[in-house]
């Protein structure tokens, strides 16, 4: 089992930056694929970035502006977000895939004002 807690969200002006954190407990997530998703009001949850043993992958919405990283010693994953836009406003979720199991955190709200 894995428990995930996201933090670091908040209100920021367009062009600003935030760093989201995902703290894992219960077991080490160092071998796992970890992803950040987001869900805006009235929209489906969408994938933002993935980090795994194979490297990192970014979706179009994040490429060039966001950076996903991990600290295995702390059992944490981060999402550094720069040049934020109002359309980045959403609840951001951390996700761990372990075999056929998927684990989710409760999410952290990011609001970008114009």
Image: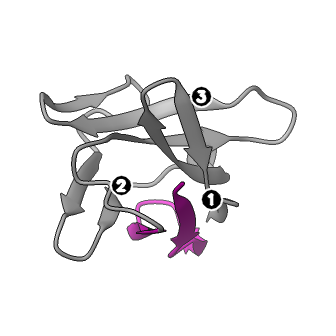
Q: Is residue 105 magenta?
A: no
Residue at screen point 42% across, 27% down: 99
Q: Nearer the viewer, mark 3 or mark 2?
A: 3
Residue at screen point 51% across, 23% down: 100
Marks 1 and 3, how far apart in space? 22 Å
Instruction: Decide: few, some or many residues near mark 1? Use Cα within 10 Å; few <14, some 14-19, many ≥20.
Output: few
Image quarter of residue 22: bottom left
Q: Which mark is residue 83?
A: 2
Marks 3 and 2, how far apart in space? 19 Å
Marks 2 and 1, how far apart in space? 12 Å
Q: Secondary structure at mark 1?
A: loop
Q: Is residue 103 left or right of residue 48?
A: right
Q: Give the image location of residue 5, x and y in percent.
A: 56, 69
Q: Is residue 75 left or right of residue 12?
A: left
Q: Which mark is residue 114?
A: 1
Q: Which mark is residue 46?
A: 3
Q: Secondary structure at mark 2?
A: loop
The earlier-in-sequence mark between 3 and 2 is: 3
Residue interval drawn in magenta: 1-25
Instruction: Decide: few, some or many residues near mark 2? Use Cα within 10 Å; few <14, some 14-19, many ≥20.
Output: some
Q: Is residue 24 magenta?
A: yes
Say which quadrant the C terminus sits in. bottom right
Q: Give the image location of residue 73, x and y in percent.
A: 16, 73
């Amino acid at each position: 089992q894995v428990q995930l807690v996201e933090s670091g969200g908040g209100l920021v002006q367009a062009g600003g930056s935030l760093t989201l954190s995902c703290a894992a407990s219960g077991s080490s997530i160092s071998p796992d694929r970890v992803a950040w998703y987001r869900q805006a009001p009235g929209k489906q949850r969408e994938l933002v970035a993935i980090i795994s043993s194979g490297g990192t992958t970014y979706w179009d919405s994040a490429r060039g502006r966001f950076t996903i990283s991990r600290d295995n010693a702390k059992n944490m994953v981060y999402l550094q977000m720069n040049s934020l836009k109002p359309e980045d406003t959403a609840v951001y979720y951390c996700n761990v895939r372990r075999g056929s199991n998927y684990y989710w955190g409760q999410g952290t709200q990011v609001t970008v004002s114009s």
